[in-house]
Image (cartoon, grey):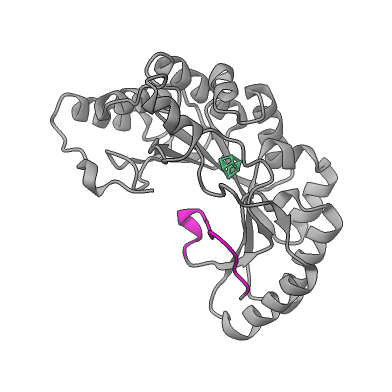
Amino acid sequence: MHYEGNIIRPPSEAYSILLQVTVGCSRNKCTFCGTYTGERFRIKPDAIIMEDIAFAAKHCRHQRRVFLCDGDALIIPQKRLLNILLEIEKQLPWVTRVGVYANAKSLNMKTPDELKELKAHGLGIAYMGLESGDDVTLKTINKGATADQMIQMGQKARAAGIKLSITVILGIAGRSRSRIHARETGRVLSAIDPEYVGALSLMLIPGTPMYQDYVNEKFQLLEPVEMLAELKTMIAATDLSRGLFHANHASNYLPIKARLPKEKEVTIQLIEKALAGKVDLKPEYLRAL
Ligand code: SF4
């Protein structure tokens, strides 16, 4: 396979065929993100992508899922993206689901019918970074979309039958907007009603604008108990018709995996116990991105 630069994939795609179709991220401006710093975004040549699919056809016969790397491969123009999916269907007939990162911009560039067409040819799940549902925070972190736009684009993907896994970040609003961030994020998640939510805990990356703000004392990092209090408020404000709310990423202090709405109350009670010091939190040295 022809891999270039950092290859990032969601934890749940650990066993998928990682097919790199773009390099970098077309936005590359979020203030907390150092994943593709200095990397110029580009779509890889079709010939290379087709070679990699042919390689997977020979050597990845036991992997049932494909994940299209990098940052936001959904940005690829419809005809080219469809062509990639058609080739996967043809050469890897055992593959049951293709996943991709998406953002509000790339979802906005696709019509509802185009998304349905992609779904019909295997695109089963999109991973979308919401980070926060608070407009002030979204602007501060330079996410490039408002909460309303996030809701509209998330609903658009769901209406096309594409599953959504949404990432939110605990601590991203700093101390002063922590409660607002938690409540607004719950509101936006409830409006989109995704199948999966993954809450990460902010870890500052040296070299990013947010890290610099922290060094210059313009941004305050939350203490572990404050992150937990934020998580509790967020879960309390999140109403999903049937979804899985994870906060069990390696970056989190307390692993949570809750089926909503069924396990909402018991999860809130568990967080309250942790806040009261009755449940151990993960030590700092064991946290990672
Ligand atoms: S957070 Fe996502 S959209 Fe923002 S720069 Fe990083 S990869 Fe790109």
In the rendered image of this protein, does residue 217 appear above or below residue 224? above
Magenta stretch secondary structure, dominant? loop
In the picture provided, is 196 more to the left or to the right than 286? right
Whether residue 61 appears in magenta in the rendering, the answer is no
Residue extending farthest left? 278
Q: Which of 189 and 178 is in front in this view?
A: 178
- Residue 186 lies, in percent from the top left, at 49, 24
Note whether residue 92 is visible. Answer: no
**In which quarter of the view is residue 17 placed?**
bottom right
Q: On the rendered structure, is 113 left or right of 42? A: right
Of residues 137 and 81, the one nearer the viewer is: 137
> Which residue is rendered at x = 75% and y = 64% of the image?
85
Q: In which quarter of the image is ligand 1?
A: top right
**Horizontal placement of 256 versus 42: left or right?**
left
Closest to the observer, 164 or 169 = 169
Image height of 144 relative to 125, above or below? above
Q: In which quarter of the image is the N terminus?
A: bottom right
Residue drawn at point x = 34 percent, y = 26 percent: 221
Query: Residue 195: x percent and y percent?
Result: 55, 42
Q: In which quarter of the image is residue 148?
A: top right
The percent coordinates of residue 213 (x first, y second) are 44, 25
Asked whether residue 22 is in view, the answer is: yes
* Residue depicted at 33% across the width and 48% down the height: 288
Q: How many labels does the image show?
A: 0
Q: Is residue 100 above or below residue 174?
A: below
Magenta part of the protein: which range? 2-14
The quadrant holding residue 206 is top left
Residue toward you, 64 or 251: 251
In the rendered structure, does residue 10 fall within the stretch colored magenta? yes
